[in-house]
Image (spheres, rainbow, N blue to C red):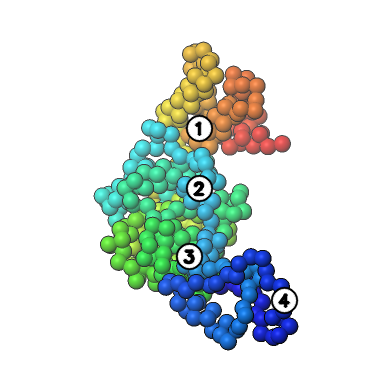
């Protein structure tokens, strides 16, 4: 409660000119008896009382803790964040086997019973697209509880200190009883979100979940998706995150399943293959493979068809030869063909016909300079 007042206790004050506005009276409220009693005691024995330009502000602590938790989270890294829109996701009809594999694991209907599912693959292979597609598929089934898509190129999305705060915030968003507990905990200890990762995990997830009937609240078996763990700042932190999650799943202190994607970095491989983690995690390889050329062709055909219709281009555009060349130089790497499509549909250009012509000339000329059938080597030539 904030008060701006002039209490007239002395004779000189009694002669002051009263304000033109009517005196404000603090009304009693049943919702805040302690505040009212405090205010009443403040004005005890006051007489000829006048409030000059009164401003009364009612403060309630409810929700302050959650707001504080949000400030220490990474909302830009959530699967439905506007900062990631439009997010990378699998084109319709592509990566169906991998999406089904993850979703079956999430629903507990696959042979993979381990609570941690690790998908690993090289840069640009489409791990984030698979993770995003899985997240969107799990939402309507009420099987998703939290997501975190790391990005090394975005300083706001690579902070390991905000991993468990972000997860706790998302759990709080769907579970009121959990939210009340965490809200109070953050009010009681405002520095909690700055403490060690293990302390955050215990105080923001393990302990609150231990006071909630997770089965009744529909939290049991829900999935946490952590995409691009290798893009989280610091290899030591990456390992610690894995170890904390593994310990919790082993001891069953949290009711979740954990889907983690990363590049096959040595430090992550060693941690995932350690004696403490390997028994409770299953691994999916997402390799670079020409076996998905038909999926890439489907993607390119649909995307360029949409551009053709939007710009009123002839039905013969693009030619089959152009599509075949793009598929060939994609070499099974999604990031390459996705980059080409974005370039072709760039609205700040001479139009898709000229943009496609530039791309075709590029892949012919640059591939000769690169000397190998390597789309990443070709993409280096984009960089000045």
| Foreground residue among 192 and 88 | 192
Report the residue marked by disc 3.
63
Q: Compute the Cα span from label 1 to label 3.
A: 51 Å
Which of disc 4 and disc 1 is earlier in sequence? 4
Q: Quadrant of residue 363?
A: top right
Q: Which mark is residue 16?
A: 4
What numbered label is drawn on residue 331? 1
Residues at marks 2 and 1, CA–CA distance in whole angstroms: 31 Å
User: Viewer-nearest of labels 1 and 3?
Assistant: 3
State the residue position of label 2: 81
- Nearest the eye: 331 or 95: 95
Distance from label 1 to label 4 (Cα)?
A: 87 Å
Q: Which of these two is toward me, 8 or 315?
A: 8
- Quarter residue 232 falls in: bottom right
Q: Nearer the viewer, mark 2 or mark 1?
A: 2
Disc tally is 4
Q: Earlier in the sequence, mark 2 or mark 4?
A: 4
């Amino acid at each position: 409660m904030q008060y701006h007042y002039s209490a007239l206790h002395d004779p000189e004050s009694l002669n002051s000119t009263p304000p033109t506005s009517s005196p404000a009276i603090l009304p009693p409220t049943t919702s805040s008896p302690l505040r009212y009693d405090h205010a009443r005691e403040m004005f005890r024995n006051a007489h000829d009382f006048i409030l000059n330009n009164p401003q009364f502000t009612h403060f309630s602590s409810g929700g302050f803790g959650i707001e504080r938790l949000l400030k220490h989270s990474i909302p830009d890294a959530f699967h439905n964040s506007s900062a990631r829109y439009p997010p990378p996701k699998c084109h319709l009809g592509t990566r169906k086997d991998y999406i089904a594999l993850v979703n079956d694991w999430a629903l507990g209907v696959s042979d993979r019973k381990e609570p941690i599912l690790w998908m690993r693959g090289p840069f640009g292979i489409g791990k984030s697209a698979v993770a995003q597609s899985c997240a969107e598929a799990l939402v309507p089934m009420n099987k998703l509880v939290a997501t975190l898509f790391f990005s090394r190129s975005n300083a706001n999305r690579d902070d390991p200190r905000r991993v468990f705060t972000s997860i706790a915030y998302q759990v709080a968003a769907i579970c009121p009883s959990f939210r009340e507990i965490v809200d109070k905990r953050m009010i009681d200890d405002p520095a909690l979100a700055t403490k060690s990762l293990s302390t955050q995990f215990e105080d923001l997830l393990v302990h609150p979940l231990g006071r909630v009937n997770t089965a009744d609240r529909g939290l049991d078996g829900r999935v946490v998706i952590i995409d691009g763990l290798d893009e989280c700042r610091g290899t030591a932190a990456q390992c610690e995150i894995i170890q904390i999650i593994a310990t919790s799943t082993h001891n069953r202190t949290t009711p979740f399943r954990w889907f983690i994607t990363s590049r096959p970095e040595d430090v992550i491989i060693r941690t995932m293959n350690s004696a403490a983690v390997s028994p409770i995690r299953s691994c999916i390889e997402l390799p670079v493979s020409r076996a998905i050329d038909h999926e890439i062709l489907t993607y390119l055909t649909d995307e360029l068809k949409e551009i053709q219709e939007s710009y009123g281009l002839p039905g013969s555009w693009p030619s089959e030869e152009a599509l075949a060349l793009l598929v060939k130089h994609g070499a099974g790497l999604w990031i390459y063909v996705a980059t080409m499509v974005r370039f072709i549909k760039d609205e700040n250009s001479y139009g898709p016909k000229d943009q496609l012509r530039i791309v075709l000339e590029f892949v012919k000329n640059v591939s000769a300079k690169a000397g190998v059938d390597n789309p990443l080597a070709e993409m280096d030539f984009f960089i000045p």
